[in-house]
Image (cartoon, rainbow, N blue to C red):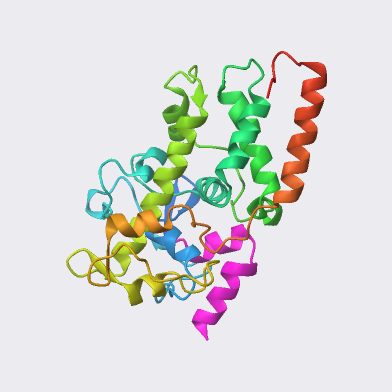
Amino acid sequence: MIIEYENRMRQYSTPDKVFRYFATLQAQHHDQHEVFMTPDDFLRSMTPGVKQPDGLGLDQYRRYDPKNISQRLNLDLDEDSIFYKLGSSGLITFSDYIFLLTVLSTSRRHFEIAFRMFDLNGDGDVDCEEFEKVAALIRQQSSIGSRHRDHANTGNTFKGINSALTTYFFGPKLNQKLTIEKFLDFQHQLQKEILSLEFQRKQPVDGQLSNREFVAVMKNRLLRGLEKPKDTVDGQLSNREFVAVMKNRLLRGLEKPKDTGFVKLMHSLIKCARDTKPAILDF
Protein backbone atom coordinates (compact mmCIF):
# COMPACT_ATOMS: atom_id res chain seq x y z
CA MET A 1 0.00 0.00 0.00
CA ILE A 2 2.78 2.44 0.89
CA ILE A 3 4.65 1.74 -2.34
CA GLU A 4 1.46 2.25 -4.37
CA TYR A 5 0.86 5.56 -2.58
CA GLU A 6 4.42 6.68 -3.30
CA ASN A 7 4.12 5.66 -6.95
CA ARG A 8 0.96 7.77 -7.32
CA MET A 9 2.72 10.68 -5.66
CA ARG A 10 5.62 10.45 -8.10
CA GLN A 11 3.23 10.49 -11.03
CA TYR A 12 0.58 13.00 -10.02
CA SER A 13 1.78 15.27 -7.19
CA THR A 14 3.34 18.70 -7.58
CA PRO A 15 7.15 18.93 -7.59
CA ASP A 16 6.93 20.71 -4.23
CA LYS A 17 5.18 17.77 -2.58
CA VAL A 18 7.40 15.16 -4.23
CA PHE A 19 10.49 17.02 -3.04
CA ARG A 20 9.18 17.38 0.51
CA TYR A 21 8.30 13.69 0.63
CA PHE A 22 11.49 12.14 -0.72
CA ALA A 23 14.07 14.59 0.66
CA THR A 24 15.69 13.31 3.85
CA LEU A 25 17.81 16.16 5.26
CA GLN A 26 16.98 19.46 6.93
CA ALA A 27 19.61 22.02 7.88
CA GLN A 28 19.10 25.09 10.05
CA HIS A 29 20.53 28.46 9.04
CA HIS A 30 19.99 30.90 11.90
CA ASP A 31 16.20 31.01 12.30
CA GLN A 32 15.41 29.35 8.99
CA HIS A 33 15.43 25.75 7.83
CA GLU A 34 16.36 24.42 4.40
CA VAL A 35 15.54 20.96 3.10
CA PHE A 36 17.97 18.97 0.95
CA MET A 37 17.94 15.82 -1.12
CA THR A 38 20.92 13.55 -1.41
CA PRO A 39 21.60 12.16 -4.90
CA ASP A 40 20.12 8.87 -3.66
CA ASP A 41 16.95 10.72 -2.58
CA PHE A 42 16.79 12.31 -6.04
CA LEU A 43 17.03 8.93 -7.72
CA ARG A 44 14.43 7.44 -5.37
CA SER A 45 12.00 10.30 -6.10
CA MET A 46 12.01 9.23 -9.77
CA THR A 47 12.08 5.45 -9.36
CA PRO A 48 8.73 3.64 -8.97
CA GLY A 49 8.66 0.83 -6.45
CA VAL A 50 11.57 2.05 -4.31
CA LYS A 51 10.25 2.76 -0.83
CA GLN A 52 11.16 5.82 1.22
CA PRO A 53 13.17 4.86 4.37
CA ASP A 54 11.06 4.11 7.45
CA GLY A 55 10.41 7.11 9.67
CA LEU A 56 10.91 9.58 6.82
CA GLY A 57 8.21 11.01 4.61
CA LEU A 58 6.29 14.22 3.98
CA ASP A 59 8.00 16.97 6.01
CA GLN A 60 9.86 14.35 8.06
CA TYR A 61 13.63 14.74 7.86
CA ARG A 62 16.92 13.97 9.53
CA ARG A 63 18.58 17.01 11.05
CA TYR A 64 21.79 17.91 9.29
CA ASP A 65 24.44 20.36 10.44
CA PRO A 66 27.02 20.96 7.69
CA LYS A 67 29.39 22.51 10.26
CA ASN A 68 29.39 19.39 12.41
CA ILE A 69 32.34 17.24 11.34
CA SER A 70 30.79 14.13 12.88
CA GLN A 71 27.79 14.57 10.57
CA ARG A 72 29.75 14.55 7.34
CA LEU A 73 27.79 12.69 4.74
CA ASN A 74 29.05 9.66 2.90
CA LEU A 75 27.34 10.13 -0.46
CA ASP A 76 29.51 7.55 -2.20
CA LEU A 77 30.13 9.86 -5.16
CA ASP A 78 33.19 10.14 -7.37
CA GLU A 79 35.31 13.25 -6.89
CA ASP A 80 34.25 14.56 -10.29
CA SER A 81 30.55 13.84 -9.69
CA ILE A 82 28.14 16.13 -11.48
CA PHE A 83 26.39 16.71 -8.14
CA TYR A 84 29.46 18.49 -6.78
CA LYS A 85 28.89 21.04 -9.55
CA LEU A 86 25.82 22.06 -7.52
CA GLY A 87 27.97 22.79 -4.46
CA SER A 88 30.79 21.28 -2.43
CA SER A 89 28.38 19.18 -0.33
CA GLY A 90 26.81 17.41 -3.32
CA LEU A 91 23.32 18.05 -1.90
CA ILE A 92 20.27 19.17 -3.88
CA THR A 93 18.06 22.13 -2.98
CA PHE A 94 14.51 22.53 -4.24
CA SER A 95 15.67 24.91 -6.98
CA ASP A 96 18.35 22.39 -7.99
CA TYR A 97 15.67 19.69 -8.03
CA ILE A 98 13.48 21.64 -10.47
CA PHE A 99 16.46 22.46 -12.68
CA LEU A 100 17.77 18.88 -12.79
CA LEU A 101 14.33 17.44 -13.56
CA THR A 102 13.96 19.96 -16.38
CA VAL A 103 17.36 19.00 -17.80
CA LEU A 104 16.54 15.28 -17.61
CA SER A 105 13.09 15.58 -19.18
CA THR A 106 14.03 17.90 -22.06
CA SER A 107 15.45 16.64 -25.33
CA ARG A 108 18.74 17.81 -26.80
CA ARG A 109 16.81 19.20 -29.74
CA HIS A 110 14.73 21.50 -27.55
CA PHE A 111 17.84 22.90 -25.88
CA GLU A 112 19.53 23.40 -29.25
CA ILE A 113 16.51 25.37 -30.52
CA ALA A 114 16.32 27.48 -27.37
CA PHE A 115 20.05 28.27 -27.42
CA ARG A 116 19.84 29.41 -31.03
CA MET A 117 16.80 31.53 -30.27
CA PHE A 118 18.47 33.50 -27.50
CA ASP A 119 21.87 33.66 -29.16
CA LEU A 120 21.20 37.17 -30.43
CA ASN A 121 24.70 37.90 -31.71
CA GLY A 122 24.95 34.68 -33.69
CA ASP A 123 28.14 33.29 -32.14
CA GLY A 124 26.48 30.07 -31.00
CA ASP A 125 26.95 30.82 -27.30
CA VAL A 126 24.80 32.38 -24.56
CA ASP A 127 25.78 34.56 -21.63
CA CYS A 128 24.43 34.19 -18.09
CA GLU A 129 21.42 36.43 -18.64
CA GLU A 130 20.53 34.73 -21.93
CA PHE A 131 20.81 31.31 -20.32
CA GLU A 132 18.36 32.30 -17.58
CA LYS A 133 15.87 33.05 -20.36
CA VAL A 134 16.61 29.72 -22.04
CA ALA A 135 16.12 27.83 -18.77
CA ALA A 136 12.92 29.72 -17.91
CA LEU A 137 11.36 29.03 -21.31
CA ILE A 138 12.27 25.35 -21.25
CA ARG A 139 10.97 25.00 -17.70
CA GLN A 140 7.65 26.67 -18.51
CA GLN A 141 7.09 24.37 -21.46
CA SER A 142 7.96 21.18 -19.57
CA SER A 143 5.55 19.04 -17.57
CA ILE A 144 7.61 19.83 -14.46
CA GLY A 145 7.20 23.56 -14.91
CA SER A 146 3.51 23.32 -15.72
CA ARG A 147 2.86 21.40 -12.48
CA HIS A 148 5.04 23.58 -10.26
CA ARG A 149 3.66 26.38 -8.12
CA ASP A 150 5.86 28.27 -5.68
CA HIS A 151 4.92 27.60 -2.05
CA ALA A 152 6.34 30.33 0.16
CA ASN A 153 4.85 28.74 3.28
CA THR A 154 6.96 25.61 2.79
CA GLY A 155 10.02 27.50 1.57
CA ASN A 156 9.90 25.67 -1.75
CA THR A 157 10.15 28.49 -4.25
CA PHE A 158 12.23 28.33 -7.40
CA LYS A 159 15.12 30.74 -6.87
CA GLY A 160 16.91 30.20 -10.14
CA ILE A 161 20.09 28.31 -10.93
CA ASN A 162 22.44 28.22 -7.95
CA SER A 163 25.66 30.19 -7.77
CA ALA A 164 27.97 27.15 -7.91
CA LEU A 165 26.40 25.96 -11.14
CA THR A 166 26.41 29.41 -12.75
CA THR A 167 30.09 29.67 -11.82
CA TYR A 168 30.72 26.30 -13.49
CA PHE A 169 28.90 27.45 -16.63
CA PHE A 170 30.07 31.09 -16.81
CA GLY A 171 33.23 31.39 -14.70
CA PRO A 172 33.78 33.05 -11.30
CA LYS A 173 32.97 36.51 -12.67
CA LEU A 174 30.03 35.21 -14.74
CA ASN A 175 31.55 36.86 -17.80
CA GLN A 176 32.16 33.74 -19.90
CA LYS A 177 29.86 32.31 -22.56
CA LEU A 178 28.17 28.91 -22.37
CA THR A 179 28.27 26.83 -25.52
CA ILE A 180 25.51 24.41 -26.40
CA GLU A 181 28.18 21.69 -26.53
CA LYS A 182 29.20 22.30 -22.91
CA PHE A 183 25.61 22.34 -21.73
CA LEU A 184 24.71 19.16 -23.61
CA ASP A 185 27.80 17.54 -22.10
CA PHE A 186 26.45 18.53 -18.67
CA GLN A 187 23.11 16.93 -19.57
CA HIS A 188 24.87 13.78 -20.79
CA GLN A 189 27.00 13.53 -17.64
CA LEU A 190 23.91 13.96 -15.46
CA GLN A 191 22.07 11.21 -17.33
CA LYS A 192 25.10 8.94 -17.15
CA GLU A 193 25.56 9.48 -13.42
CA ILE A 194 21.90 8.84 -12.64
CA LEU A 195 22.11 5.59 -14.56
CA SER A 196 25.32 4.64 -12.78
CA LEU A 197 23.69 5.28 -9.39
CA GLU A 198 20.80 3.05 -10.37
CA PHE A 199 23.22 0.41 -11.58
CA GLN A 200 24.99 0.46 -8.21
CA ARG A 201 21.67 0.33 -6.36
CA LYS A 202 21.08 -3.08 -7.93
CA GLN A 203 24.29 -4.25 -6.18
CA PRO A 204 25.77 -5.95 -9.24
CA VAL A 205 27.97 -8.99 -8.71
CA ASP A 206 31.47 -8.41 -10.09
CA GLY A 207 30.21 -5.26 -11.81
CA GLN A 208 27.64 -7.15 -13.89
CA LEU A 209 23.84 -7.06 -14.12
CA SER A 210 21.88 -10.00 -15.44
CA ASN A 211 19.37 -9.35 -18.19
CA ARG A 212 16.58 -9.98 -15.66
CA GLU A 213 18.00 -7.33 -13.31
CA PHE A 214 18.38 -4.94 -16.22
CA VAL A 215 14.73 -5.36 -17.22
CA ALA A 216 13.72 -4.94 -13.56
CA VAL A 217 15.47 -1.56 -13.55
CA MET A 218 13.27 -0.49 -16.44
CA LYS A 219 9.98 -1.60 -14.89
CA ASN A 220 7.30 1.10 -14.93
CA ARG A 221 9.39 3.30 -17.26
CA LEU A 222 8.30 4.70 -20.56
CA LEU A 223 10.06 1.86 -22.32
CA ARG A 224 7.81 -0.74 -23.87
CA GLY A 225 8.78 -3.82 -25.83
CA LEU A 226 12.39 -3.71 -24.68
CA GLU A 227 14.35 -6.58 -26.17
CA LYS A 228 17.18 -8.24 -24.35
CA PRO A 229 20.40 -6.44 -25.20
CA LYS A 230 22.24 -8.28 -27.95
CA ASP A 231 25.77 -7.10 -27.27
CA THR A 232 26.27 -8.90 -23.97
CA VAL A 233 28.48 -11.72 -22.83
CA ASP A 234 26.88 -14.60 -20.92
CA GLY A 235 23.68 -12.62 -20.51
CA GLN A 236 25.41 -9.95 -18.40
CA LEU A 237 25.59 -6.17 -18.70
CA SER A 238 28.60 -4.24 -17.49
CA ASN A 239 28.19 -0.72 -16.09
CA ARG A 240 29.42 0.79 -19.37
CA GLU A 241 27.03 -1.35 -21.45
CA PHE A 242 24.14 -0.46 -19.15
CA VAL A 243 24.76 3.27 -19.59
CA ALA A 244 25.24 2.93 -23.34
CA VAL A 245 21.95 1.08 -23.81
CA MET A 246 20.01 3.56 -21.69
CA LYS A 247 21.59 6.97 -22.29
CA ASN A 248 19.16 8.04 -25.04
CA ARG A 249 16.09 6.54 -23.39
CA LEU A 250 16.33 8.31 -20.07
CA LEU A 251 13.08 10.06 -19.24
CA ARG A 252 13.12 8.81 -15.66
CA GLY A 253 9.41 8.14 -15.53
CA LEU A 254 8.67 11.80 -16.25
CA GLU A 255 6.00 12.91 -18.68
CA LYS A 256 7.36 13.89 -22.05
CA PRO A 257 7.72 17.64 -22.56
CA LYS A 258 4.89 19.31 -24.43
CA ASP A 259 6.63 18.84 -27.74
CA THR A 260 4.00 20.30 -30.05
CA GLY A 261 3.43 23.49 -28.09
CA PHE A 262 7.11 24.03 -27.47
CA VAL A 263 8.17 23.57 -31.08
CA LYS A 264 5.33 25.77 -32.36
CA LEU A 265 6.31 28.50 -29.93
CA MET A 266 9.98 28.31 -30.79
CA HIS A 267 9.39 28.29 -34.55
CA SER A 268 7.06 31.28 -34.20
CA LEU A 269 9.70 33.17 -32.24
CA ILE A 270 12.41 32.20 -34.71
CA LYS A 271 10.25 33.32 -37.65
CA CYS A 272 9.62 36.63 -35.92
CA ALA A 273 13.32 37.07 -35.23
CA ARG A 274 14.18 36.20 -38.83
CA ASP A 275 11.80 38.85 -40.11
CA THR A 276 13.38 41.51 -37.93
CA LYS A 277 17.02 40.35 -37.73
CA PRO A 278 17.69 38.17 -40.79
CA ALA A 279 21.45 38.57 -40.54
CA ILE A 280 21.59 37.41 -36.93
CA LEU A 281 19.42 34.31 -37.05
CA ASP A 282 20.32 32.63 -40.31
CA PHE A 283 19.22 28.99 -40.08
Residue that lies at the very extreme toward the left in this rendered image: 206
Between residues 102 and 258, which one lies in front from this camera angle? 258
Total numbered circles? 0
Relative placement, left or right, of 268 versus 15 is right
Residue 16, magenta (yes or no): yes
The residue most toward the front is: 230
Q: Tell me which residue sits at (33%, 56%) in the image.
A: 196
Q: Can I make out residue 24 in this image?
A: no
Image location (x, y in percent) of residue 99:
55, 45
Q: From the top left corner, tell me how far across and down residue 216 is, in percent.
A: 40, 75
Quarter the C terminus occupies: top right
Q: Which residue is drawn at 40% across and 55% down?
A: 194
Vertical relation: 56 (above or below) 106: below
Which stretch did the figure color magenta? 1-23
Which image quadrant is residue 9 in?
bottom right
Question: Looking at the image, which residue sits at the far bottom?
Answer: 1
Left or right: where does residue 68 sit relative to residue 265? left
Q: Which x, y percent locates residue 193?
A: 36, 51
Vertical order, 124 against 153 (above or below): above
Residue 183 is at least partly visible in this image: yes
What residue is shown at x 56% (from left), y 22% (from top)? Answer: 124
Asked whether 236 or 133 is in front, the reply is: 236
Residue drawn at (68%, 39%) of the image: 137
**Magenta-colored stretch includes residue 179:** no
**Residue 43 percent location from the top left of the image:** 43, 61
Q: In this view, does 111 lie to the left or right of 195?
A: right
Q: Main secondary structure of the magenta part?
A: helix
